Image (cartoon, rainbow, N blue to C red):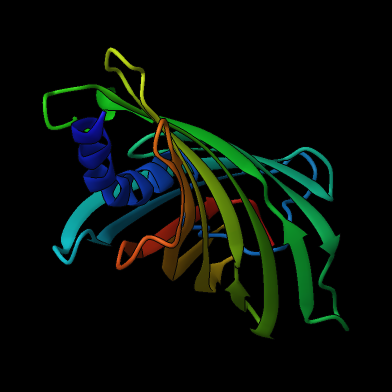
Amino acid sequence: MTNLASRLRSLVGIAVAVGLIGGCAVSSYTTADTLPAGRAQFWAAPQALRMAVASAPQTMPFVELGTRYGLTDAVELGLRVGAGAQVDAKIALRRSGPQQRLSVAVAPGVGYIGNFSGTPTGADGDDLHFVGATLPVLLSYRLGDGVQLTLGPRVAWLMQYVETATAATTHTIAAGTSLNVLWRLTPSFAIVPEVAFVVPLLRSLTGAGAVVGTGDQRALQVGVGFLVGGGS
């Protein structure tokens, strides 16, 4: 059990960083404004994830693809695939308008990532699986016509499951934020450069109890989203 616990602890940083980008996304590439009912939007975001794991930084480039659909004027559904897959929703709490520059929404999501998408295996080739949930609060402020600044503080839960004889499981609670600027070049096309950061706060390892804080394990994600469709 000691060797297993040590091996899993060495993977926690990668689990949080890699798992969060697929199991529960760190990035947003959107604003707090929901799509009009019946409108769809598609997006692609080339990006890079910088992971600090036990003082040994690693960089992982990847591309995320997604789609969003306005279920009602105040509720939007979304799907994204990249390192893993996530489904999410966006619920408008405060909508922007001609006299209102600030919009607010919550965007809960759940996701999964597994070895099929190229995630790392354990020290002995054990398969890793990640299931996660995230709850961002999106705060958007209109800077001018077609330009919005969005802050996305969030909390996330990630479960890392390792296929071993003991079926070891790690639960991690993390917090982070994203910051992006949306430039709408036409009514149906926009670019969204974004930076996001996440750090684990608490983890619980099977048979080893809970640990508050995870030292220097953290993740920084930078990318640019290209949004097509949706309209104004």
Quadrant of the snapshot with the N terminus: top left
| Direction from residue 37 to residue 63 in the image, left or right | left
Q: Nearer the viewer, residue 98 or 163?
A: 163
Find residue 143 and report its horizontal and vertical position in percent: 65, 87
Find residue 117 and report its horizontal and vertical position in percent: 27, 29
Q: Where on the picture, by quarter, is residue 113?
A: top left
Q: Is residue 90 above or below residue 182?
A: above
Total marks shown come to 0
Q: Is residue 49 above or below residue 103?
A: above
Q: Where on the picture, by quarter, is residue 224?
A: bottom left
Quadrant of the snapshot with the C terminus: bottom right
Determine the residue positioned at 35% across, 39% down.
82
Report the residue that reaches farthest toward the top: 165
Report the residue that reaches farthest toward the front: 2
Q: Where on the picture, by quarter, is residue 197?
A: bottom left
Q: Is residue 183 above or below residue 219?
A: below
| Direction from residue 49 to residue 194 in the image, left or right | right
Q: Is residue 31 above or below residue 44?
A: below
Q: Is residue 150 visible?
A: yes
Determine the residue positioned at 20% across, 22% down.
126
| Direction from residue 184 to residue 56 in the image, left or right | left
Report the residue that reaches farthest toward the bottom: 143
Find residue 22 and report its horizontal and vertical position in percent: 41, 40
| Direction from residue 85 to residue 157 in the image, left or right | right
Q: Nearer the viewer, residue 119 or 166?
A: 166
Determine the residue positioned at 60% across, 57% down.
155
Find residue 144 and report its horizontal and vertical position in percent: 66, 87
Q: Is residue 144 visible?
A: no
